[in-house]
Amino acid sequence: MAYIGRQPQIGNFQICDAISTVNNQAAYTMQVSSVNVIPETANHMIVSLNGVIQKPNSSYTVAGAVITFSSALVTGDVINFIQILGSVLDLGVPSDDTVTAAKLSSNAVTTVKILDSNITTGKVANDAITLAKMATGTDGNLITYDTNGNPAAVSTGSSGQILTSAGAGAVPSFQTASSGGITQVDLFRLTSDINSNTDPISSNLERADDASSGRIGTGMSVSSGTFTFPETGIYECTFFVNGTCNSQNYNIIIKVTQNNSSYDAVASTSTAMQENRDVNGVATCIVDVTNVSNDKVRFSCSSMSGGSDTVIRGDTALNHTYFRFVRLGDT
C-alpha cells in the first residue's frame, strides 16, 4: 500500500501489560507477558494516560523498566496503554533464510568476509579457473601428482630431452633420449689386391672417400688390421669380397675378440670357380659390443694359392672388397 509522506519504519512493537494505578504513586514497572521490558529511550514509547498521549521526557521519563510520570497518579487515573516501539531504525538480526541475493549490494561480500575453509570445490564452477588465475611458475615446468596424490611440478628439462615415466609411485621427469637406433654407419675398403693368405688383413685399408661417400657418427678406427668400435651397441659387420678364381677356392673370415686378445672366427664363406672367372662372397655377423676397449673385430683370408689363380681385388676408387659396419641399436 502507498503512504502519504514518509513510510513508517519497522520496529519491535510491544504493548505492555495493563498497569493499575496507585494513589499518589508516580513510578510503575513495565512488563510484557509478566516479563520486565526496557525501552530504548522515552522517545521509543507511546503512552496514553486518561485518553491523552503523553509527551516523552516531559510528561514521563524512563529508567530501565520503570516509567515515572511527572506527577503522581491518583485514584481514578487510568493508564490506557503503553506501546514500546523498539529501535525503529534498527532492523535487528534477520530471521533465517530471509536475506536474499537481491538484498545484497554489488561488491558487498569481500574476501575478508569469507573463511578460507569455506572455499570448497563445490563453490567453484567447472572450467572456471583460467590460466590467468593460476599461480606463476617456471618456464617449461609441467604439473603432475606426487606419490601422495598432491600436485607437483616436473622440473624443466634440457633441449632435446623427452618426458619419461618411471611407472606408478614415481613422478615423471625429463630424460635424455635413448641413443638407440642407427647412430653409426661406416665403410672401409681394400685398396690393393691380395693373392696370399692374410690374417689379419692389416694393410691397404682406407675409409671410402669418394665425393658421394658418407657415414653416420664418428665411425670405426683401425690399427694393424684391428677395427675398434666408436661406442657400445649391437653392430652388423659385413665382409664383402670381389675377386678372381681359377680352378681354386679361398675363404674369407670375420674374427671377434671380447678381451682384446684372443680372437674367435664367427663368420666365414668360401668362393670357388673351375675356370678363371670373377667371384663374389660375403660373410656377415652381429656383434654385441659392451666394452669398446675389449670388443674388436678383424678380417682375414685363407686357402689362397699365392698366384694369379686366387685374387681378392682391391681398388682406391671403387668398393670391390669392403668392410661395412652398422650400429643397429643399444646393447
Image (cartoon, helix red, strand yellow):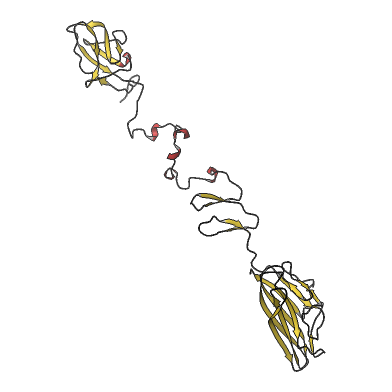
Residue 271 percent across, percent down from the top left: 72, 88
- Give the x, y percent position of residue 140: 61, 51
In the rendered image, the quadrant that contains the N terminus is top left
Q: In this picture, is 244 found above or below 180?
A: below
Quadrant where the C terminus sits is bottom right
Seen in the picture, residue 294 relative to 46 is either above or below; the reply is below
Q: Give the percent coordinates (x, y) of residue 123.
A: 43, 42
| Residue that sits furthest to the left in the current view | 76
Task: Please say if 326 is above or below 178.
Answer: below
Relative to the observer, which residue lies in front, 185 or 252?
A: 252
Q: Is residue 224 left or right of residue 59?
A: right
The residue shown at (72%, 84%) is: 281
Q: Is residue 267 rendered to the left or right of residue 121? A: right
Residue 56: name its quadrant: top left
Residue 211, percent across and down? 79, 71
Q: Quadrant of residue 48?
A: top left
Total number of numbered labels? Answer: 0
Q: Name which quarter of the figure residue 278 lies in.
A: bottom right
